[in-house]
Structure formats: C-alpha cells, structure tokens
C-alpha cells in the first residue's frame, strides 16, 4: 500500500507536454522530473532557457522505486544523470547547468562576483522564508494560523520585491533569482482560491513582476494544466499530504 500522494496524473499536459515530447531522445544529460513539481520546474526552466540538450524522464517520486533511489537516495525530484554521475537538488542543478554548459546562453547568474553573491542571497531568501511560508499557508487549517502564515508570506515577498530592479530581478536579464521563485508564481492561484492571497495585496510592484514572470516562454512551456494539480494541492490544503515537505512542515522541521 502506497501513500495517497502516489495518486498523481501520470504525465505533463498543455505546453509542458509538448516540451516533454521534444525531449525523448537519449542525451548526455537525463532529467528525472515530475511534471507537477515546483522544484523540478526550476531546473526545467533553466534547461529550456539555455537550450541544453536533455532527455526528459517522468518519475513518480512518491513510489520510491529502487531505480530512482539509486539516482537520488532522498527519493526526491528533480535529479539528473550527467556523464555517468547522479546529481540532485533543484538549485544546485541550475548551477550545474551554468558550470557544465558555459557556451549555452543566457548566463543565469550575473558575471560580477558581488552580484553573483547577491543573486545567491536572494535565492537563499526564497528557500528559507518564502517556500516554507508558502507550505505553512497551504497546510494551515485554523483561520488564525492561515492569517499568520499569509502575513508571513506577504512579508517575505515584500522584502524580495523592494530589491527587484525591474522588469526582472536583476534588470533586463531573466536569471536564477527569477527562476527560483517562478514555479510558485504559476501556482499561486491555489492560494488565491483557497487562502485569500492576492498578488496586489503584496504590493503593486510584486503583481507587475509576477504577471510578467508567468508569461516567460520557458515558464509557460514547463507548466501543465491546473485541473491535474488541484488533486495534489487538495491533499496539502486538507493537510493530508504525506510528502517529505508536508511532514517536515507539520513537525516544524526544515523542508528537505
Ligand atoms: N530540496 C529539493 C526538494 C525536492 C522535492 O521536495 N520534490 C518533491 C516533489 S515537488 C518530491 O520529490 N517529493 C517526494 C516525497 O516527498 O516523497 C529540491 O530543491 O530539489
């Protein structure tokens, strides 16, 4: 008997399905992905932005199948196999693509060392404050706890927004900081429909940024239909999800 989270629509849909279809041929880089996963989408957007050849393989990470655990012992997507090495962790994989494919443009990190550090600081902000607040808001059941989590989310996004140069985080170039948060922008309708979140309530600048990021080709081309996502998010909204992230949030631990 598996966990309820195993019940996932089996493949990508909409524009994401067309992207998957274009990436079935064997390549040096195998991308182990779940169409539904925001962490996967970070690495996927990076692959698409840089035009790197890759083979897409769909994995249901909740099944913890031995072939996948041999690639990522944590059993989490995304993961890649590159030159016979198994590697994982979404943001580390984005940086791997920068390092391993330097001739593939655009660069996702600025070239100036201090700017690179700044980009990593804001990616860290997203990982440590925004993503956990997002999960707490999804999983909170009592209205008071939802209110606390919503305000925590707004605060994290307002801090982020005051540092956006515009139109993208570092100006004209779409890059790693935008990629780190984009998957949650295209999923924020879940919070809007169920938890009272509104882009405009963060700030007009956040709304303008989010409205722009969600239209980026690499973001659109890695996004599936909402109707199959809501089944998955329903388990979070009822606080029934048994994913590693959901269990960590419930126990007050850091998301793995
Ligand atoms: N820190 C990881 C998180 C990856 C992650 O949590 N992926 C989820 C899917 S969205 C997963 O594989 N879950 C399987 C599980 O929780 O058992 C990363 O950034 O790559």
Image (cartoon, helix red, strand yellow):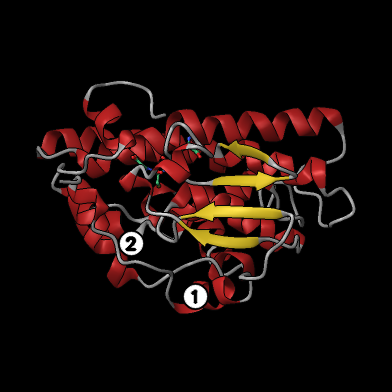
Cα–Cα gap, marks 1 and 2: 21 Å
Which of disc 2 and disc 1 is earlier in sequence? Answer: 1
Q: Is mark 2 within 8 Å of ligand 1?
A: no
Locate residue 143 relative to residue 36 in the image: left or right. left
Residue 151 sits in which quadrant? top left
Image coordinates of residue 119 in percent, x first then y, are 69, 35
Locate residue 6 relative to residue 27 in the image: left or right. left
**Residue at the limit of the structure toward the front, as seen here:** 66
Mark 2 — residue? 189
Nearest the viewer among 170 and 28 is: 28
Q: Is residue 162 visible?
A: no
Q: Residue drawn 38% across and 29% down?
A: 255
Q: Residue drawn 37% across and 33% down?
A: 132
**Residue at the limit of the structure toward the right, as seen here:** 103
Mark 1 — residue? 17
Nearest the viewer among 155 and 179 is: 179
């Amino acid at each position: 008997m598996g966990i309820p989270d195993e019940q996932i629509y089996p493949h990508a849909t909409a524009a994401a399905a067309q992207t998957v279809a274009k990436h079935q041929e064997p390549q040096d880089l195998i991308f182990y992905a779940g169409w539904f996963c925001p962490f996967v989408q970070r690495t996927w957007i990076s692959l698409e932005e840089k035009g790197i050849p890759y083979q897409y393989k769909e994995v249901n990470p909740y099944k913890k199948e031995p072939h996948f655990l041999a690639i990522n012992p944590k059993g989490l997507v995304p993961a890649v196999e590159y030159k016979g090495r198994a590697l994982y962790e979404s943001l580390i994989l984005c940086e791997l693509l920068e390092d391993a494919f330097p001739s593939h443009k655009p660069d996702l990190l600025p070239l100036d060392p201090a700017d690179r550090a700044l980009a990593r600081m804001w990616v860290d902000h997203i990982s440590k404050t925004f993503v956990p607040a997002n999960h707490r808001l999804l999983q909170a059941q009592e209205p008071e706890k939802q209110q606390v989590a919503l305000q925590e989310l707004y605060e994290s996004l307002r801090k982020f927004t005051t540092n956006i140069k515009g139109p993208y985080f570092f100006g004209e170039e779409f890059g790693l900081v935008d990629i780190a948060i984009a998957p949650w922008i295209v999923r924020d309708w879940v919070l809007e429909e169920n938890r009272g979140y509104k882009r405009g309530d963060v700030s007009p600048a956040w709304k303008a940024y989010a409205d722009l990021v969600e239209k980026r080709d690499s973001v659109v081309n890695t996004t599936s239909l909402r109707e199959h996502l809501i089944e998955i998010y329903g388990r979070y909204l009822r606080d029934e999800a048994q994913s590693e992230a959901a269990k960590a949030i419930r126990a007050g631990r850091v998301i793995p």
